[in-house]
Amino acid sequence: MFEISLKQLKILINIFDFGGVTGAARALKTHQPTVSRVLRDVEKKIGGAIFEKHQARLILTKRGERLFEYAKLVLTQTDRLSADIRLINKNEQNFISFGVDIIAADSVIAPAIKQIKEKFPNFAPMISEGKTRDLCAELVEGRHDFLVSTLPKDLNPSLEYEVLFSCSLGIFGRSGHPIFYDDKNPIERVPNFPWIFPSDPSHRLREMDRFFEYHQIQRPQVGVTTMSPAVEKKLLLENDWLILAQYNIFIEEIQSGAVKVVNPHFNFNSIDVALIKRNSMNLSLAHETLLKAIRQESVIYSNIQDTLTEVA
């Protein structure tokens, strides 16, 4: 059995990355004989050459390929372990900065943070809520670790994503709303009632416009503007307002029967919410735990949406 130290593994990787002993010594700010000695010692231990020259380039031998496969795995895990141990020893908090838009904030972020707080009591999330385009630009600049937001059409090539869930939207009114009084198509009478409009130019306004255009309905001009779900609920339950919103905002109200969906078969009700991060992002244990929690809550949220859509 042979032993290879972490320092030796780092030196070998630098030899390969910088094209030889001289480049590795310069990058590591050490002496060339020291690097050469490490290479000879490791090759002696594994019983053969690690590198060979090919057209003035270093390439890995079969022994070298297998060694590097494990070396990179060991060094990556060691770096993560060191970072987490430093946090524990210094009693520092696990600062994770991420951006969210209103859809993600209302659906999966809060329960995911509650879940990770149980495992990391010192977890300190730094959450920025904003528009997806602005958040993506900040992510590219390195101001966030990742985003949970609607998926933009023109995603920067330096970013990668995974779709977490599709967000359902519906037109809601209180159960005693006049729009439900007779058997006429309620969609045709949508313009006859006041609406709650969001005060920001978000996805809801765009979806409203698409909906009205599709059904050739004139968009209602009367309404109030709000960004608070609590205010929206109060207005909806006490007045003859209509609102285009996510199903999750009215989960309890739909289950209790206080709120109904005007059109359960809404034509534009699928908005993809994605986890967006930089390519080859280095994840800490706290990062991975939080992302796992977000994925779990996304599955739960999707199931709730499916159930409510059937109920509606």
Image: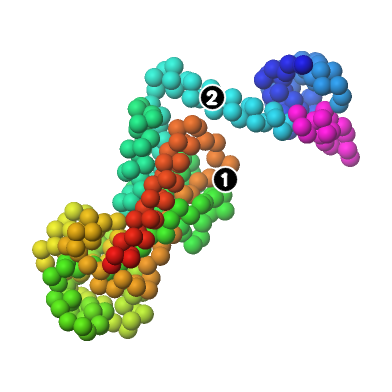
Q: Position of residue 69 (x, y in %)?
A: 72, 33
Q: Residue at x 38, y 29 (%)?
A: 120
In the image shown, does 168 or 299 lie closer to the viewer? 299
Q: Quadrant of residue 3?
A: top right
Q: Quadrant of the C terminus?
A: bottom left
Segment tinted magenta in the rendering: 50-67
In the rendered image, residue 110, in percent from the top left (x then y), is placed at 32, 43
**Three-letter amino acid code at the position of disc 1:** Asn
Residue at (38% x, 35% y) in the render: 116
Circle on res. 279: 1
Expressed as whole percent of the image width and height from the top left, the position of residue 97 reads 41, 38
Q: Position of residue 136 (x, y in %)?
A: 45, 51
**271 within the magenta span:** no
Q: Can residue 8 be seen by looking at this rendering? A: yes
Residue density around tag 1, few if under 14, some if 14–19, many if 20 or more, within 10 Å: few
Look at the numbered disc 1 and give the secondary structure of its residue. Answer: loop
**Camera-side residue: 287 or 311?**
311
- The residue depicted at 38 percent of the width and 70 percent of the height is 268
Q: Is residue 66 magenta?
A: yes
Residue 13 position (above or below residue 231):
above
Q: Quadrant of residue 185?
A: bottom left
Amino acid marked by disc 2: Leu
Q: Secondary structure at mark 2?
A: helix
Marks 2,1: beta carbons within 8 A: no
Q: Which residue is mark 2?
A: 81
- Circle 2: is it few (<14), some (14-19), or many (20+) Cα within 10 Å? some
Left or right: 241, with 126 as reference point: left
Picture layout, residue 282 above or below residue 199? above
Q: Nearer the viewer, residue 139 or 189?
A: 189
Residue 29 visible? The answer is: no
- Tell me which numbered mark, 2 or 1, is placed earlier along the sequence: 2
Q: Residue at x 65, y 31 (%)?
A: 73
